[in-house]
Amino acid sequence: MNILLVLIPVTVLIIVIAVALFFWAVNHQQFDDLDNPGVLPLMDDPAPADTPVSAAEATPAAPATPPPPADRDA
């Protein structure tokens, strides 16, 4: 029975902290838009129509690994 003297105040403390965190989140607009943030990573970035392609973007990238050396014995 003595454990109740510890568990009840600890439980009340946890509930008070959870309620305080909930009201903090509501006051800081954490629940304003629940639909769009989950969809944003799935949406494509719009392609800018009036931006010219630079020369660096137009040339293909160099291969990541060099070609193997030629066989000199043959």
Image (cartoon, rainbow, N blue to C red):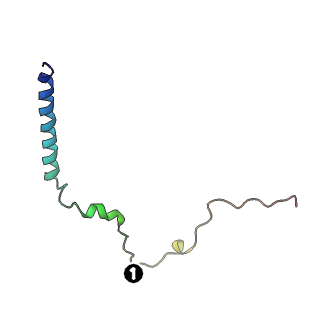
Q: Camera-side residue: 18 or 45?
A: 18
Residue drawn at x 38%, y 77% is 48
Quadrant of image for the C terminus:
bottom right
Q: Camera-side residue: 10 or 71?
A: 10
Horizontal relation, residue 59 to residue 51: left or right: right
Residue drawn at x 16%, y 44% is 21
Q: Camera-side residue: 20 or 65?
A: 20
| Residue 26 on image: x %, y % | 14, 52
| Residue 34 on image: x %, y % | 22, 60
Quadrant of image for the N terminus:
top left
Q: Quadrant of residue 59?
A: bottom right
Q: Residues within 10 Å of mark 1 (few under 14, many from 20)?
A: few
Q: Camera-side residue: 50 or 6?
A: 6
Horizontal relation, residue 62 to residue 55: left or right: right
Residue drawn at x 45%, y 79% is 52
| Residue with the most extreme top position | 2
Q: Secondary structure at mark 1?
A: loop
| Residue 18 on image: x %, y % | 16, 41
Residue drawn at x 39%, y 80% is 49
Q: Which residue is mark 1?
A: 50
Horizontal relation, residue 38 to residue 74: left or right: left
Q: Is 12 rendered above or below residue 72?
A: above
Horizontal relation, residue 32 to residue 46: left or right: left
Give the amino acid at mark 1: Asp
Q: How many marks?
A: 1
